[in-house]
Structures are given as C-alpha cells and as structure tokens.
Image: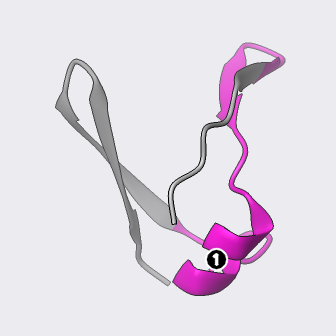
C-alpha cells in the first residue's frame, strides 16, 4: 500500500497529506496523535500513539 504524495506548506510548517486508504488502514483520524521519528536523511517513521 505505497503512495507518493507531495509535500505542501501551511504557514511555517511543511505538510504531508496521508491518503484516505492509508489513514483508514492505520486508524488515523482528524486530531489523532502520532510520533515522528527521523530514522535517516531520507526516511521518516510515523507511529500512531492514540
């Protein structure tokens, strides 16, 4: 279930949109809490914590 998405901007923050099928699979909803782990210069891990 791989998707390519473009990074956008909102104010001073960068935004990565999560496609609906991936959000549903991970049970991520509006206002869900996640942790971001920069694993390497080209790898970002996202963990759902709520």
Q: Is residue 27 visible?
A: no
Callout 1 crowding tier (Cα within 10 Å): few <14, some 14–19, many ≥20? some
Q: Measuring 70% from the left and 26% from the top, which residue is drawn there?
A: 6
Residue 10, placed above or below residue 30: above
**Which residue is found at the position 27% from the left and 34% from the top?**
43
Residue ranking furthest to the top: 12
Q: Nearer the viewer, residue 4 or 27?
A: 4
In this figure, which residue is indicated by the disc labeled 1? 28
Q: Which residues are magenta?
A: 9-33
Q: Please state if 3 lies on the left or on the right of 18 as rendered.
A: left
Give the residue at x 74% y 69%. Answer: 31
Percent across and percent down for residue 35 are: 39, 58
Secondary structure of the residue carrying tag 1 is: loop
| Residue 18 to residue 32: above or below | above
Q: Position of residue 49 (x, y in %)?
A: 41, 77
Specify the farthest residue to the left.
Answer: 40
Say above or below: 45 vs 12: below
């Amino acid at each position: 279930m791989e998707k390519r998405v473009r990074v956008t901007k909102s104010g001073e923050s960068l935004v990565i949109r999560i496609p609906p099928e991936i959000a549903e699979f991970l049970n991520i909803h509006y206002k869900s809490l996640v942790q971001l782990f920069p694993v390497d210069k080209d790898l970002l891990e996202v963990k759902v914590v709520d």
